[in-house]
């Protein structure tokens, strides 16, 4: 069995409750598997690698073992989005909840990889069709993780935006407090569109939420 050899990833602790005064825990930041490149590259890599892995499974070149099938079933169960059947984007929900859903995928994929001994590899900028070996479980998990760890980066940005906003509020007149969405948009102008695209990858029909339905 191959054990994980890739670098650990960035993790951020945050209370997902309605308060926007969440705080980080005291764990040291860890190194991401994929470099924080542009969002479009992360999304493309996630789509390419998950599609390639699922196609290999459906065509029979990758036959799931019992452990792999149970792991994927558990992965879907552990990341239940609890959105009540509403389609993305989930604009009516707080950013804490929306980002928490994506961040949960990162943590659960790491846990699955460690438990099964699959290595999470960087996939951004690499075409899965160029592989000279059979595609398998590690590739599927790595594809999912390419976008999932962006949720942790967004959580970190949200914490920083909250701190900046609270500091700025002390010097502004009452009633002129910047919204959290506005604060994040200043840091990442396409944040709202990128978040909606990430939600569509993880939730809704044909998304990772339906992963179990794609398995033969």
Image (tube, rainbow, N blue to C red):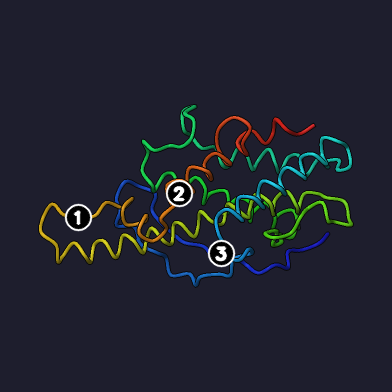
Disc 2 and disc 1: Cα gap in Å?
22 Å
Disc 3 and disc 1: Cα gap in Å?
30 Å
Q: Is residue 131 above or below residue 101?
A: below
Q: Is residue 94 above or below residue 167?
A: above
Q: Which residue is mark 3?
A: 36
Please tell me how crowded label 1 is: few (under 14), some (14-19), or many (20+) other residues with Cα within 10 Å. Answer: some
* Residue mark closest to the camera, 3 vs 2: 3
User: Which residue is depicted at the point 88% across and 37% down?
Assistant: 60
- Assign a secondary structure to mark 2: helix
Q: Which residue is mark 1?
A: 177
Disc 3 and disc 2: Cα gap in Å?
17 Å
Q: Is residue 155 above or below residue 211?
A: below
Q: Is residue 157 visible?
A: yes
Say left or right for 189 vs 29: left
Q: Tell me residue 67's x, y (percent).
A: 78, 44
Q: Tell me residue 87's x, y (percent).
A: 49, 30
Q: Which residue is mark 2?
A: 99
Q: Check whether the beta carbons of the residues at disc 3 and disc 2 lie within 8 A of each other.
A: no
- Assign a secondary structure to mark 3: loop
Q: Foreground: 190 or 80?
A: 190
């Amino acid at each position: 069995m191959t054990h994980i050899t890739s670098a650990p990833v960035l993790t951020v602790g945050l209370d997902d409750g309605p308060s926007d005064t969440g705080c980080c825990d005291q764990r040291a930041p860890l190194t991401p598997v994929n470099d924080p490149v542009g969002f479009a590259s992360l999304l493309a890599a996630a789509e390419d690698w998950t599609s390639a892995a699922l196609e290999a499974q459906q065509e029979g070149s990758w036959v799931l073992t019992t452990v792999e099938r149970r792991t994927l079933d558990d992965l879907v169960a552990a990341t239940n989005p609890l959105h009540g059947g509403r389609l993305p984007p989930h604009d009516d929900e707080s950013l804490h909840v929306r980002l928490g859903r994506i961040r949960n995928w990162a943590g659960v994929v790491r846990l699955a990889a460690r438990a099964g001994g699959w290595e999470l590899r960087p996939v951004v900028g690499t075409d899965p069709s160029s592989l000279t070996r059979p595609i398998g479980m590690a590739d599927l998990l790595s594809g999912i993780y390419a976008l999932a760890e962006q949720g942790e980066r967004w959580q970190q940005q949200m914490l920083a935006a909250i701190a900046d906003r609270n500091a700025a509020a002390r010097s502004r007149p009452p009633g002129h407090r910047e919204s959290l969405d506005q604060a994040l948009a200043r840091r990442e102008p396409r944040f709202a569109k990128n978040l909606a695209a990430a939600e569509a990858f993880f939730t809704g029909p044909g998304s990772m939420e339906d992963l179990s339905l794609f398995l033969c």
